[in-house]
Structures are given as C-alpha cells and as structure tokens.
Amino acid sequence: MLYFSKLRITLISLVALFFIYFALSNFQDPENSLISKRINLGLDLQGGSYLLLEIDNEPVEIQKLQNTTTVIRNFLKSKKINFNDLRIQNKTIVFTVPIMDVDSVEAFFLDKESEINPYYNQYKSHQFEVIIDDSKFTLSLSKYGLIEIKTSSQDQALEIVRRRVDEVGTNEPNIIKRGNNRILVELPGLDDPMRIKSLLGKTANLTFRFVTQNKSDTFGTEMLQFEDGMSEAMVSKRIIVNGENLLDAQPQMNNQTNETVVSFTLDRVGAKRFGKATSTGVGKQLAIVLDGKIVSAPVIRDTIASGNGQISGGFTFQSATDLALLLRSGALPAPLNIIEERTVGPDLGQDSINAGVIALIIGFLLVIIFMFFKYKIFGLIANVTLLVNLFFLVGILTLFGATLTLPGIAGIILTVGMAVDANVLIFERIKEECKKEKNNIIAFDTGYVKSKTAIIDANITTLIAAIILFIMGSGPVKGFSVTLAVGIFTTLFSVYFIARMLTGLYVVRNKEKDKLI
C-alpha cells in the first residue's frame, strides 16, 4: 500500500541517515570523526605495485622423491632385502629386488592397513603410484601427491611472503592465493617494487657447510660459486646447520673491521651442532651458503659454542638489512617466479579518480534532467531516491571496508542507470493504470505492485551475473562485481521504500487531482 505508518517512516529515515553518515565519513578528517572506517582505494586509484607470483614446485617434488628414496633404502636394509640400482629417474623412483621378495615390498607400498606404510594417509589416498614389472618397482607421485605438495607449498609460501612484505613496512598489503600454485601480492602506495621483487625472488635457503678438497668425502661434494661470481669452492654436501635452526638475524657494524655484517643466533639444537662442528673443524673454512651460492667462507679460529655468529660478505647496510630480513622470515619451500607485474603511479591513480568522478557527475546530471523533464514532480522524487541510493551504496562499502577500484566506479555508474530503469518501469506502469482507474491511490499502488515482478526478475539476473564474475574473476573484476551486487540491493530498497514512501506521501495529499502523472 502507499500508506506508510509513522513508525515505518521513522525506521526508513533512520536507516537512510545511518548509511548517509557512513558515506560522508569518507570526506571527514579521521581524527574528528566518530567512525574510523573508510573505503580503501585499489592500486589503480591510489597507485602501487601488483605482482603475480608462480611457485616452481619441481625442486619440492625432487626433494620428496629423494626423501622417499632414503625411506625405501632404510626399509629394505631393515628387512635385509637385497636391492639393485635404487635411483631417481625422470621424476620416478626405480629399483629392483629378488623375485622372492617382491611380495614383501609390494605389501609395504600397497597394504592399506599397514602402519609402516608411509604413503597411505588418513584420507585413504596414496601419495605414490606403484608399478611392478616382475622384480622392478617404479614409483611416481600420484595426482593426490602432487596436489598435496602444491597445497602445502602454497600455504608455506603465502605465510613467508606475508612475513617478508610486513617486515618491509608496506601499507595495507593484499596477499592472497590464486589457483593452487600462484600468489597475488598487491602493494598500495608502492611505486618502486624493485626491493620487494628482490626479496620475494630469493628462496633464502641458508646452510653452513665445510669447504673441502677431498672429492671422496663420505657425504659427497659439489662446486659452488661465490656470490661475486669471481671464484668458486668445493664444499661438502653435509649440512651442519640450516635456516631452520635460526632464531634471529640482525644487521650490525663490526667494530674491529668497520664493515656491515649480519649477526645471527641459533636455537639450542643448532648451537649444539655448530659448537661441535667448530670444535672439530678449527683451521677449516666454513662456507655460508645462501640459495646455492657462497656468501662467505671464513676460517674457524676457535670453538663457537654460544650459538651466536656473524655473516660477512662486503654488505652495504641495506643489503645486510635485507639478508637479515630474509633469514628471519624463513626459507621459501620452493622458488617463486614473477609472471606478471604492474605499477601504477599516484598521479595516474588520481587521474583515474578524477575521470571516474567526472563520468559519474555527468551521467548523474543527465539522468536528473531527463527524469525531471519526463515525470515532473515524480522525476524529482526519483532523483532524490537516486542520490540516497548512491549514499547507501557508498555507505555499505565503507561499513565493510571494501576496496574501490576503477571498475568499481564503473559498477557504481551502472547502478545509477539500473535505479533509473526501475523508476521508469514503475512510472510507465502507473500511467497505464491511471488510464483505467480513476482513484489515484489505487492506480499508483497497482502500478508499484504489477511492476515489481519485472524489476525483481531483471535484478536477479544481473545479480547472478555479478556472482559469477566474483567467483570466476580476479582483482578489478571482483571489484566491479561487488559494487554491482551491492548496488542491486540498494536499488531495490531505494525504489520500494524511499521512492514509494515519498510518492505515497505526495499522492495521498493530492489524491483529488485529475492527473498526477
């Protein structure tokens, strides 16, 4: 009905004032406002950097296979089963056993009830696929195993990327998953991403190993280059301590040599291993290896039992700070590759805001002029409703701390058009009813009722499209879909509560007039 009780009018007015205040809070000084919430501006509006990182899981898969090879070797030895040619080949583990022991080994891999089986998890899915050809076994990672590795790597990488970005002090970074092997990093206000790119591009896998000249070392050896690329050294594959044993790392000035170093502190286990290695290795060189390159290789002069030490390597204070940051945040489980990057300067972002605001004002004014010319007083009511609808939309976005992007502004402009469309449908329907019905109140009420189905159907289809865009899209597309979806609800509320209330008040007071519309 067109009649609205005083209580209903009061409630609608309070709701409108509530969201209008939230919308206006964006233009107030936060210190003088009761509400601290604001709409966050996206990268395309305030400037900043956008990085899409892809995780290279191949090293993790190889490491998984190497660890599994060790488990298999230990099992076969414990069961005194002879085996031949146990190796990794093309991302598969192959080995052969005597034909009489095939059943025992097969049971180890395939018995679902066996507690010794390390490849069968709580979800009853195998991490490995096993192929048996006579006495030859071939193991490869199953689909489930690969998914598990990707999920685990992504979760770990996400946490470490967040630590590194937070340590730099970037304002309100947005770090989220994309698919099962990508991470999106948005850094508002950052227009020079070189340092962040450098930090995120390093795995930061730290190990301490002895330099050796003995190629027949029990643990094996490998040639590694120094970071300067000018020389190389042979180091043992035996890892004394690694980054997992690190408690803290800080940049510092060495008073004796007057150079910048990175001081580190090891945990109890690391300090014990480090102390034992340095006590037996006095006079040897200890290589400090970061991501497969030697940072420095100092000579051990005395036992270091405290668990404290220094890494030197001709650092500047900035490079020492970054290295300490990398070590504190921990090593990435797998290398990260930057596959997409965008940088928007603050000037370009401001230009986007200005262009969006101008487009909104022009569109708004044209709609106001058209509606007033076409429907006179009811066009004025529609225009007031349109303005309130805009405040509703901005207020809701503010309330939830949403991020506004340039496509989001486009969504707001589209909402204005949709709100006008709903009013036009209603007023045209009312015109038809007025031709058949002499009572203005009944004609207007019938017009609102009969146009409701068409308006709701149109908005539901648009809402479905917005939901699909939100689920399937990313970044700016999500911003557009959010403002579009919120705009649909604010439009329906504005049309059927605000506009209908104002229309009802006018029609009731002027019900005796022959032609109201």
Image (cartoon, grey):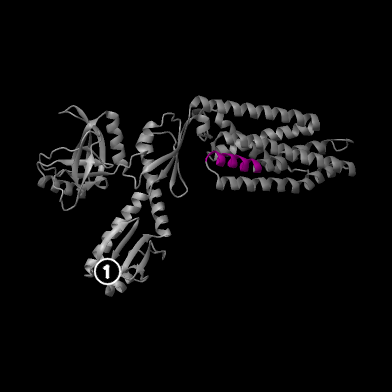
Residue 134 percent across, percent down from the top left: 33, 71
Residue 186 lies in the magenta stretch: no
Residue range in magenta is 475-488
What is the x, y in percent for residue 468? 59, 48
Q: Is residue 241 left or right of residue 192?
A: left
Q: Residues within 10 Å of mark 1 (few under 14, many from 20)?
A: some
Task: Name which residue lies at 52% across and 28% down.
Answer: 349
Q: State the image coordinates of residue 407 (x, y, percent, origin top left).
A: 58, 36
From the top left corner, tell me how far across and down residue 61 is, in percent: 35, 53
At x 40% / y 52%, what residue is drawn?
150
* Residue 164 location, quadrant: top left
User: Where is 139 relative to 10, above or below?
Assistant: below
Task: Name the residue located 41 percent from the left edge and 64 percent from the top edge.
Answer: 125
Q: Which of the pair 331/495 is nearer the observer? A: 331
Residue 147 is drawn in which quadrant?
Answer: bottom left
Which residue bears the numbered disc 1?
97
In this rendering, the answer to whether 131 lies above or below 237 is: below
Determine whether, in the image, residue 81 is placed left or right of residue 388.
Answer: left
Left or right of 22? Residue 119 is left
Q: Quadrant of the C terminus?
A: top right
Regarding mark 1 in the picture, which secondary structure is present there? loop
Q: Residue at x 36, y 44 (%)?
A: 335
Q: Within the magenta stretch, is there residue 484?
A: yes
